Amino acid sequence: MPKVETLTKLEWEIMKHIWKNGQATVRDVHAALPPDQSRAYTTIQTYMERLIEKNYLTKKKIGLVNFYSAKVKEADTLRRETSHFVRRAFDGSFSKLAAFLFDTQNFNAEDLETIKRLIQEKERKND
């Protein structure tokens, strides 16, 4: 598969809408964006065309309307973007990321229990 570039904040919002709905028109995405991401219709159209160039979307014309669909899975994108971030910010060390999060975030008891359970599950799978 060709190299897939990272996403901007607005591109993430567009992709989240398309992943959630399977496909969308520019009008669909424009109407669904949160107020802080509101842009002109033509701007959204430009961003969606760029997402085709970046290998995130495909486009199918039905009648006069273009329907955009995801070319990549959300989980694959999250995995790639997370790995990219960890390589840049933490020298590729997920344990450094975890240590940073534990030092800088306030986890509630439920979060801590969930994290413990996830670690235990991962340890069982690695045995």
Image: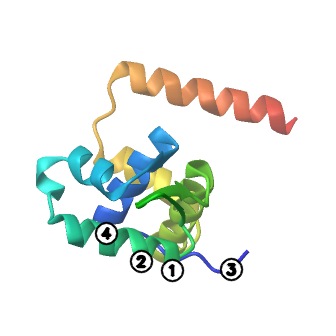
Residues packed near mark 3 inside 10 Å, few (<14), some (14 to 19) or many (20 plus): few
- Of the residues shown, which amino acid type is indicated by label 3? Pro
Task: Tell whether label 2 touches label 1 (CB within 8 Å).
Answer: yes
Q: Which residue is mark 1?
A: 53
First-in-chain label (4 vs 2)? 4
- Label 4, label 3: how far apart the Cα atoms are: 23 Å
- Label 1, label 4: how far apart the Cα atoms are: 13 Å
Q: Is residue 85 above or below residue 27?
A: below
- Of the residues shown, which amino acid type is indicated by label 2? Arg
Q: Which mark is residue 45?
A: 4
First-in-chain label (4 vs 3)? 3
Q: Residue at x 83, y 39 (%)?
A: 126
First-in-chain label (1 vs 4)? 4
| Res 60 quadrant in image | bottom right
What is the basis of the colouring in this image? rainbow
Q: Is residue 106 visible?
A: yes
* SS for callout 2: helix
x%, y% of residue 36? 12, 54
Residues packed near mark 4 inside 10 Å, few (<14), some (14 to 19) or many (20 plus): some
x%, y% of residue 47? 33, 72
* SS for callout 4: helix
Task: Tell whether label 4 touches label 1 (CB within 8 Å).
Answer: no
x%, y% of residue 40? 14, 66
First-in-chain label (1 vs 3)? 3
Q: Which mark is residue 83?
A: none
- Label 1, label 2: how far apart the Cα atoms are: 5 Å
Q: Which mark is residue 50?
A: 2
